[in-house]
Amino acid sequence: MSGPLTGYRGIVLTQAWAGSYATQLLGMLGAEIIQVEFHGRPDSWRGSYDRPIPDTVADTPRATANQHPWNVNPLYNSVNLNKQCITLDLTDPAGVEIFKRLVPLADFVAENFAPRVLGNLGIDYEALRQIKTDIIVCSLSAFGNNGPWRDVPGIGGTIEPISGMSSLLGYEDGPPLNSGQMYPDAAAGLNGFAGIVTALMHREMTGEGQYVDLSMQESSLTFIGDALLEERMTGNVRGRRGNRHMTFAPHGIYATADNKWIALAAETANQWTDLCGVAGGDVWLEDGRFSNNAARKANEDALDAEISGWVAGHKRDDLAKRLSNAGVIAAPVLDAHEVASDETLRERGFIVEIDHPEAGTHPHSGIPVQFSGTPTVVSRHAPLQGQHTQEVLERLLGIEEDEYVDLVNRHITGAGPS
Amino acid sequence: MITNSALHGIRVIDLSTSVSAAWCVRMLADFGADVALFEDADGHAARRLGPFDDAGNSVIAEYVLADRRSAILEFKSLEGISAVRAAVAGADVLVCSGTRGEMETFGLDFNSLLQLNPGIVICSITPHGSTGARSKHPGNDLTTAALSGWASINGLADKPPLKPSGLQSSYCAGTIAYGSIVSTLLARRKQTPLRGQFIDVSELEVMASTFGPALLTSQYQREPQPRKAKVDMSTGPVPVKDGHFALTISRPHFWRDAMNVLGLDDLAEDPRWGTSWYRKEHADEYVDRAQEKLAQWNKMDLFDTLAALRVIAGPVLETNELSENVHLEERGFFRTPENGGPQYPGPAFQMSATPAHLTQRAPGPGDHTAEVLRDFSGLDESDIDALLASGVAK
């Protein structure tokens, strides 16, 4: 491994998106991440065991003939890079016992079950610190580990509305919307990553572990914190703005001649002048309605109509290039395939091709940070379920093959339905 | 002095001019770092972002610039840059909003800063990173939403693509930059002598990272994920009597209990409906019926009923409703800075041993110029007076 977190190890019970993304980021920065998955109850982002495999996945060239639905779910495979996966039946005391033997070898434990689950299994923070006094435990739950909503479950699709995010996302004349994918999970993953490294820093300084309690609702709220503060400072309840900015105009997404979309904005007087320059004339510059940002903001409907009419006569990529080169804030709206094939993202090493034995080779979103002194690398595809159980149990606990086979036979570990 | 902080003793030079970098610094400060913000005479760019309160204070600046001291310094003068370099010499971290090339034009090229202070961790947070074809192009939350793929899946198919609301790219990039800086400080602790390094954070790549599941799903499906044709209860909030409500079910028992609450016993008891893929393929058979039932409820009554059954559910709350939320109040989520001011939301996570602190609201520009030049740049009173007299510092 490489990266600034090389040498740290997490034994993690993370699943779905938020927890898995947090621990993937830690793994991308070099920490050894061992996911402990419930034997018999798959990570929800692997999907159910009887989920049909889509034809597009079944047809993909790949290393192995056998495909299992739980190993070819793109959701799971997108947020579990640089990890190993073992399975344990944590409802069986023997499974819990093995988990407890792993904890002393870990720097941190992370999980995103409902708050009562770890306690029910006998492996909550208080229990784990009895095993390892300086352990760090990070819980990512819907509403945090205390308060009246502690035991209410949630997922990104319900946290988005109850955190206020949905009330801000949407068209100006339309209803509240959820994002195209459950964005609060991503926000929680980023903050979970931040929380765990903060706790590691404190442990390095003092030798003291601690409990990190992340509420997905609160994590999301901090990302719209300015809207909450606006209500406190001004009394205004912010509504939906579409693509418009709170301060600047123009600021929007416009249809192009080739049935695509372009985003463009001007935040400075120079950018506005440059935009007018690319548009090819002084008409807008001389129009009193657009003479400065305040005027443009006051006449934004008229401005958007003018820009829409102009943009509609141009092709997306050509126009985006001309505007960007002129110093205007502009970009093509890329779809998922265009992001994956984007030349600049590939040149910078962000988009990486990853070979997965059951799913084939695909481009992935890679590591979103570059370090000059401790470079990072995507070194592992998302693990197959239980792929590393035998190797990890032998390497870390000295469990040899006979004992491992016995664990499989007793359904304490294994892959697929128990 | 606060000592139960994870970053106690870490000194940060804040040369941010963007919300993303300012948010990164806000997190460093909340967890105990001592921060000096150097801003030019025009003030930090966030101060010019609306909305504003009656006194003309930017809400954004109030939020992202809290917990630090501010000095006004003229960066274009040799004396000003010299004072910044002196501060860098004694710091652990420098955060900026410029690429490597842009910082060089200010006389702050990173190699020379590393020579000045071999242990300094320098983090640059920019729209597109410090290298590559887009590195010189301007960008913001709108264009990173466009380039990362998020705009292509947000919103409705018959309307324009939609950026995430507000300043999401900035908060995401700031947060990952924070975690990356702390990770680098962890690595640095294991080195003798201390070795600093340069961290390059591209707001676009951070957003494309959060887009990862949609990107890979689109690859597996061989079709880019589109925007929704319409909103129904399987994808987002739908109308209820007093607003909107999301009932985006995941596990089978959530489905069973929710359908029972809505009085749709046949949907509750048939186990086929318990799986997501089956519901997706047969949405036409249940969506209208269930939404008709949902429309008869008030949002908090339905939430309370489902919460008692431990079923996931999401009433759409607005900011004023969240300000009065009992759960958040009990968790102590809204905090008043120790030196007064409005109640701030946060932090994003609670730490048992090293909680986040909110020591002061955002400073005014130059509120601490003299003490920053003394404590960070190491200047004596006569040097400070000279800088103030010449207008280089204010």
Image: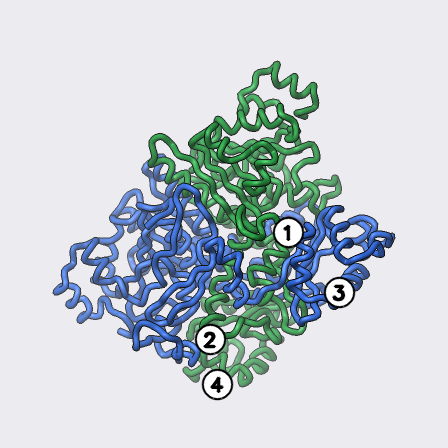
Q: Circles 4 and 2: CB distance less than 8 Å? A: no
In which chain is the residue bearing label 2? Answer: B
Residue A309 shown left or right of residue B271 in the figure? right
| Chain drawn in green | B
Which residue is located at x 36 percent, y 30 percent?
A: B193
Could you tell me how far apart the alpha carbons at marks 3 and 1 are, in whole angstroms?
29 Å
SS class, disc 2: helix
Q: Circles 3 and 4: CB distance less than 8 Å? A: no
Please rate how many residues cluster around mark 3, counting C-alpha atoms within 10 Å: few if below 14, some from 14 to 19, many from 20: some
Could you tell me how far apart the alpha carbons at marks 2 and 3 are, in whole angstroms?
44 Å
Q: Position of residue B40 (x, y in %)?
A: 66, 33
Establish if A175 lies above or below A273. Answer: below
Tag 4: amino acid: Asp
Marked residue nearer the N-terminal end (3 or 1): 1
Give the quarter of the image for residue B298: bottom right
- Tag shown at residue A308: 3
Q: Circles 1 and 4: CB distance less than 8 Å? A: no
| Chain drawn in blue | A
Residue hosting label 2: B255
